[in-house]
Image (tube, helix red, strand yellow):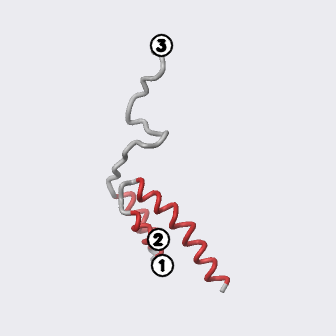
Amino acid sequence: MHILLAVVISAVLFLYPLWIIFKRAGLNPQLAFLVLIPYVGFLLVIVFLGAMQWSIHGSGPGDRSKPDNSGASL
């Protein structure tokens, strides 16, 4: 019973962040379930995210796609 609980907790700890990563990358977030495939799931996710073209929308604070014209020029 304890092993099942550990597996469920581990799955949730991996699935939620990967779901967010896939969604922000503009991909289908359900691809995060690939991590549940034994032995090769995490490798598949890494290869899939590394090989795909990400559609970045620039909605975060770290967006550097546009120049910041708010400061005074020196």
Which residue in the structure is indicated by mark 2? 35
Task: Choose between 71 and 53: the one closer to the eye.
Answer: 71
Residue carrying label 3 = 74
Q: Is residue 37 above or below residue 67?
A: below
Residue 38, numbered circle: 1
Q: CA distance from mark 1 to mark 3?
A: 57 Å
Q: Nearer the viewer, residue 43 or 49?
A: 49
Q: Residues within 10 Å of mark 2 (few under 14, many from 20)?
A: some
- What secondary structure is marked by label 2? helix
Amino acid type, residue under disc 2 in the picture: Val
Residue at point 64% right, 82% down?
Answer: 3
For the residue pair 24 and 42, the one nearer the viewer reads as: 24
Picture coordinates of residue 48 (x, y %)?
37, 63
- Of tags 1 and 2, the one toward the viewer is 2
Secondary structure state at the residue bearing disc 1: loop
For the residues labelled 1 and 2, the Cα–Cα distance comes to 8 Å
Q: Residues within 10 Å of mark 1 (few under 14, many from 20)?
A: few
Q: Are marks 1 and 3 in contact (CB under 8 Å)?
A: no
Kindly identify the residue that appears in the image at 45 percent across and 15 percent down: 73
Image point (47%, 58%), residue name: 20
Q: Are marks 1 and 2 in contact (CB under 8 Å)?
A: no
Q: Up-down: is 16 above or below 39? A: above
- The reply to whether the C-beta atoms of the residues labelled 3 and 2 are less than 8 Å apart is no
| Residue type, mark 3 in image | Leu
Residue 65, given in percent of the width and then of the height, sits at 38, 36
- SS state under label 3: loop
The Cα atoms of the two marked residues, 3 and 2, are separated by 50 Å
Q: Quadrant of the N terminus?
A: bottom right
